Image (cartoon, rainbow, N blue to C red):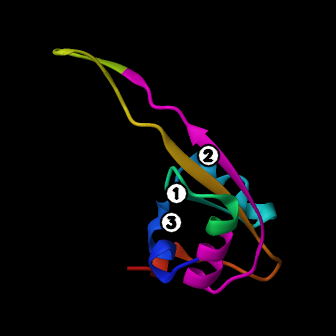
Amino acid sequence: MKAERIYKVILEPHVTEKAAMPTGDENLVVFKVANDAKKREIKIAVEKLFKVVVENVRVAVVKGKTRRTRNGVGRRSDWKKAYVRLAAGNDIDFSVME
């Protein structure tokens, strides 16, 4: 994988209450990723960017909602999120990141 692709795969951490619930015991981190990203690319990108060991990656495509506006019916874009399980002893602390 090319070095430029690493920075295009991981878009941002997905920090919500629901995403934070399983992280206590399972060492799980959730990221918003590019729609065309593959599991292997996500694993390599997380390992190189955050210098951690990744055990496995699960992905889910979140379908965009249909919304009514004053101009008619609109639709939000679909997006992909990745559940990344880190190996024991590894951790990513988003509070110290810029």
Q: Which residue ends up furthest to the bottom in the rendered image?
A: 51
- Residue at image mark 2: 18
The residue sitting at 63% across, 87% down in the picture is 51
Image position, residue 5 (x, y; %): 48, 72
Q: Quadrant of residue 28?
A: bottom right
Magenta range is 43-66
Q: Residue 59 appears at what percent x and percent y?
A: 67, 50
Residue drawn 80% across the image and 63% down it:
25
Task: Locate the C terminus by quadrant.
Answer: bottom left
Q: Earlier in the sequence, mark 1 or mark 2?
A: 2
The alpha-carbon separation of the residues under discs 1 and 3 comes to: 5 Å
What kind of residue is marked 1? Val
For marks 2 and 3 on the same chain, the one whose residue lies earlier in the sequence? 3
- Give the answer, above or below, for where 41 lies relative to 65: below
Q: Residue at x 44, y 78 (%)?
A: 4
Q: Is residue 61 left or right of residue 40?
A: left
Task: Tell me whether the residue at label 1 lies in contact with that at label 3, contact meaning CB atoms closer than 8 angstroms.
Answer: yes
Numbered tag placed on residue 33 in the rendering: 1
